[in-house]
Image (cartoon, coloured by chain):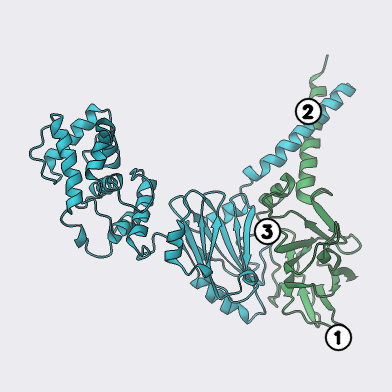
Amino acid sequence: MPIRISWFAIILAVIIAGLIHIATVLGLPQIAPRNAWNRLSSLAEPNKLVVLPAASPAHQSLPLMAPDMRYAFCRYDVTRGPVRISTRIIDELWMIAFYRPSGANFYTISGGDINREKIEIIISTESNALLDTETEALYDSDDVVVVTAPENSGLAVIRVPLAGISYAERAEQALRQARCERIIANAGLAENRSNMLASIQRELQVRDYHPGSVDGAANVYTRAAIMAYQSDAGLAVTGIASDNLLRHIVSGEADGPMSELSGSPPDTNDLIKAVQQFLSDRGYRLGNPDGVVGSGTRRAIRAFERSRGLPETGRISGKLVREISAITGADFADAIRN
Amino acid sequence: MWTFFTILFYAGLALFLGLGSAWQMVDQGSALTTGRLGPWSVWYSAGSPNADPYTKAHFARSGRLPITSTSALYYVARVDGEGDELTSECEYSVEGTPIDAAWWSIAAYETSGRLIPNKANRHAFSSRDVALRADGRFQIAVSRDARPGNWLPAGDSDQLQLVMRVYAPRTTESTVGGREVDKALPEIRRVACR
């Protein structure tokens, strides 16, 4: 079978070869199944620090791992708030490198750069960074480095080049004590009420409770969002912000008895009463506006939600308060704002 | 009229040229992305967020996680100073002056990237544990059989590669187009073969 030789076909083949070349090179990072991100992701939960076993012929977590270095890494995920990495730094050789999932090393800090014995690194995206006041309240700012992550997840890798064999044990011990964790999960961090409120607002916001702005100031939307959360979680519906509530939102359980949650303070009563009054005025029957969410109130809220085309929840929430405010104008929120 | 075989021939040609050139430039590198310094090669934008597509593809495929060149440099040698492939059949002498950096290390691997099993359990020499000669230089023997002094076992693996890591190099990049570490890399000389 003869093959026709034509310049046109050769040039066409070369152009197509060029396109194949470009597609292959650009596509490789996406389809490489054994890239570092995939290899390390399978070794650890998000926001957990893992010390890799020393590289040996029998075991290497990554190809070309250095035999005379020790590694620890954290696959951070800041979707639900900032993550903190803390570690001791034994000497200037320590190096902490941050990577995007693609493997791009967007930030590196070494023991020589910071020149102190321990370091706290806070990773966050631009949108969920801690407020300056929060950072100041939490840390002696000299020890804190804030890293802005370009994406919600990535890798932080601590490398310890060994200064001699006897150094290995010390390095491994220090790495085992290093931590990687979500900041809010650390109990007792909210040092004053404003920080605590801001933290609760942020936690509720990422859970779609619409607490209004994250500003550390309690407003009617925040209170309503707290009540919605309490209602969902089967807690007494009080609308009160507390450290225990924050712990409950973050970890699903509270450390101590939620004693401060029993009984409703006057302003929460006011909010409930205002909602009851509003519903009652519009002809929903719920008994006396008594400031307590009972079955009558819940039934009335459901009916109201149904009439407004909202999902039926039967609870007081940021959404409900916003809906009522939209109907009554600013008066409603003003009437109960403290 | 084009025959089926003619079309197949040109399609095959396009595929061969496209994939072949992509593989060559991603796996081996090219003058655009890599430097060749005697036996050593270096990907200049390894780990950089602004790396070119070839460098990105190379490291995604390799599974490595390099630090950017301002903090760490990686040099890989698969050949000796003459350009012949490194093999455990031969003995090599790696000789140079200590590099001006916080830390550096020379490690031996199989070409697959795995460390070489050996009874001495020795896989690398670093700036902290390599023995220097009286003239301040170091010499590392890479061979299958034990050698006095700095001995880096080559094991039984057929082909091997050496990786030089330089952490926190104390260099000034004042000289255009050249890094001081690039010029201070050790030589790899073949001593004898079986």
Measured along the vertical axis of the image, is residue A56 above or below residue A244?
A: below
Q: In the image, are marks 2 and 1 on the same chain?
A: yes
Q: Secondary structure at mark 1?
A: loop
Mark sitting earlier along the chain (3/1): 3
| Residue at x-position 34% and y-position 63% | A192
Measured along the vertical axis of the image, is residue A180 above or below residue A338?
A: below
Q: Quadrant of residue A298?
A: top left
Alpha carbon distance from label 2 to label 3: 37 Å
* Colour cyan, chain: A
In the rendered image, the quadrant that contains the N terminus of chain A is top right
Q: Secondary structure at mark 2?
A: helix
Where is residue A205 shown, x and y percent of the image? 37, 46
Mark linked to residue B134? 1
Where is residue A176 shown, x and y percent of the image? 51, 72
| Residue at x-position 35% and y-position 56% | A250
Q: Chain of mark 1?
A: B
Say which amino acid is labelled 3.
Answer: Pro
* Colour green, chain: B
Q: Residue furthest left?
A: A287
Mark sitting earlier along the chain (2/1): 2
Q: Secondary structure at mark 3?
A: loop
Q: Chain of mark 2?
A: B
**Dots 2, 3 in contact, CB < 8 A:** no
Which residue bears the numbered disc 3?
B66
Q: Residue furthest bottom?
A: B134
| Residue at x-position 37% and y-position 59% | A195
Say which amino acid is labelled 1.
Answer: Ala
Q: Quadrant of residue A325?
A: top left
Question: In the visual, does A309 lie left or right of A8?
Answer: left
**Dots 3, 1 in contact, CB < 8 A:** no
Which residue bears the numbered disc 2?
B11
Where is residue A234 shown, x and y percent of the image? 22, 50
